[in-house]
Image (cartoon, helix red, strand yellow):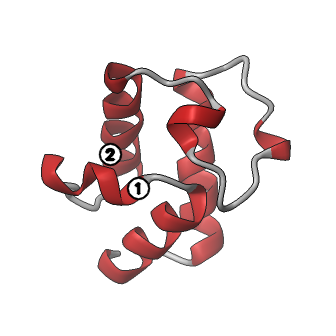
Amino acid sequence: MTREEIRHAVLAALADVAPEADLGRLAPDAELRETLDLDSMDFLRVVQRIATATGVEIPDADAGRLATLADCIEYLAKRA
C-alpha cells in the first residue's frame, strides 16, 4: 500500500466512526481522540476498521501509537 492509500483508509475509518467530523480540515499532527472527540471505544473501532481495510494486524498494545493521522500513516507504512 502507498502512503496515500493508507491515508485514505485511515480517513475512511474515521469517517465511519465519526461521520460528523470535518476530516478535510484534520491536521496530520492533530490528536485524533481529542480533535474528533472519540472515546476509547470509538477509537478502538477506528483501529479495528483500519486493520481490516489495510490488512495490517494492529495489536491492542500498539493502539496508542496511532494518536495522529501522521502516526497512523507511519505505523502502517512500515507494516503494510
Considering the numbered disc 1 on the image, is that residue within a helix, a strand or a loop?
helix
Residue 16, above or below 64? above
Which residue extends farthest bottom?
78
Q: Is residue 32 left or right of residue 39?
A: right
Q: Is residue 52 left or right of residue 3?
A: left
Q: Is residue 67 left or right of residue 34?
A: left
Q: Residue at x 60, y 22 (%)?
A: 18
Q: Residue at x 80, y 31 (%)?
A: 22
* x and y percentages locating residue 21 in the rendered image: 73, 26
Picture disc at residue 52: 2
**For residue 32, what is the image quadrant?**
top right
In primary-sequence order, the first of circles 2 and 1 is: 2
The amino acid pointed to by label 1 is Leu
Picture disc at residue 58: none
**For residue 45, what is the image quadrant?**
top left
Foreground: disc 2 or disc 1 = 1
* x and y percentages locating residue 60 in the rendered image: 16, 46
Q: Residue at x 42, y 35 (%)?
A: 46
The amino acid pointed to by label 2 is Thr
Q: Residue at x 54, y 50 (%)?
A: 10
* Residue 70 visible (yes or no): yes
Considering the numbered disc 2 on the image, is that residue within a helix, a strand or a loop?
helix
Q: Which residue is mark 1?
A: 66
